[in-house]
């Protein structure tokens, strides 16, 4: 039951609407299940990097003001670029368009960089996974910590598959006009997050 609870924790960590879910939805609508899944897979790798940094206690350099400002700025550019690209390509959406028109690795690196340079993700993992480590370490050994960390990843993976499935179902059964509206919304959502990151960077530099 404890293992299952950590899987549910992974699901709850991945489920809140954010840049990754928006990017998965957009890629799935434009290119199908695999591209959407690779966005989530890239984000999972970034999450794994954060978990390892926290696990080995070397994440504190990310709390340096310079690093935080750099992450805000890079996150701003990545999200705004991805959002604008998403909206610009909305006209290409068709229910029968080529699913392989774009490399899956572009989708992978899109998810990876969106997650890796998202300061909110870093703070999120510091708060959630850091507390999980501290509480679990008091009761269990290293093997259990690794096991429960794996359970969290299983939960994230399940959500990744779920989002990829939802986006591909949208692509298959909804009208092209409706899909374009969803894609535009996803792009605006990404740009909105990017602008927020930009404001944070501006305040860090000149506040």
Image: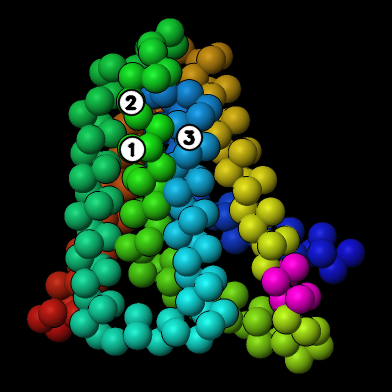
Q: Is residue 96 left or right of residue 192?
A: right
Q: Position of residue 26 (x, y in %)?
A: 40, 33
Q: Nearer the viewer, residue 65 or 181?
A: 65
* Mark 1 crowdedness (10 Å alpha carbons): few <14, some 14-19, many ≥20: some
Distance between the Cα atoms at labels 3 and 1?
A: 11 Å
Residue 204 appears at what percent x and percent y?
19, 80
Q: Quadrant of the N terminus?
A: bottom right
**Nearest to the observer: residue 194 or residue 62:** 62
SS at badge 2: loop
Question: Vertically, is 69 above or below 22?
Answer: below
Residue 95, x across and y down, in percent: 44, 11
Query: Is residue 132 found inside the magenta-colored segment of the image?
Result: no
Residue stretch in magenta: 143-148
Disc 3: which residue? 36
Mark closer to the chain start, 3 or 2: 3
Identify residue for label 1.
106
Q: Which residue is mark 2?
A: 102
């Amino acid at each position: 039951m404890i293992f299952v609870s950590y899987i549910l924790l992974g699901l709850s960590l991945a489920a809140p609407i954010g840049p990754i879910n928006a990017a998965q939805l957009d890629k799935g609508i434009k290119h199908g299940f695999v591209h959407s899944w690779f966005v989530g897979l890239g984000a999972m790798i970034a999450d794994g990097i954060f978990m390892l940094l926290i696990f080995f206690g070397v994440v504190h350099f990310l709390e340096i003001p310079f690093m935080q400002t750099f992450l805000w700025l890079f996150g701003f550019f990545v999200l705004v670029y991805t959002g604008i690209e998403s909206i610009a390509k909305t006209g290409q959406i068709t229910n029968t368009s080529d699913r392989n028109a774009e490399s899956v690795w572009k989708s992978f690196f899109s998810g990876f960089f969106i997650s890796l340079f998202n300061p909110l993700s870093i703070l999120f993992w510091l708060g959630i996974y850091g507390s999980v480590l501290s509480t679990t370490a008091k009761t269990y050994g290293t093997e259990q910590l690794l096991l429960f960390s794996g359970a969290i990843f299983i939960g994230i993976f399940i959500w990744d598959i779920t989002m990829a499935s939802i986006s591909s179902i949208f692509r298959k059964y909804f009208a092209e006009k409706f899909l374009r509206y969803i894609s535009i919304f996803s792009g605006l959502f990404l740009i909105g997050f990017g602008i927020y990151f930009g404001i944070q960077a501006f305040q860090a530099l000149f506040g």
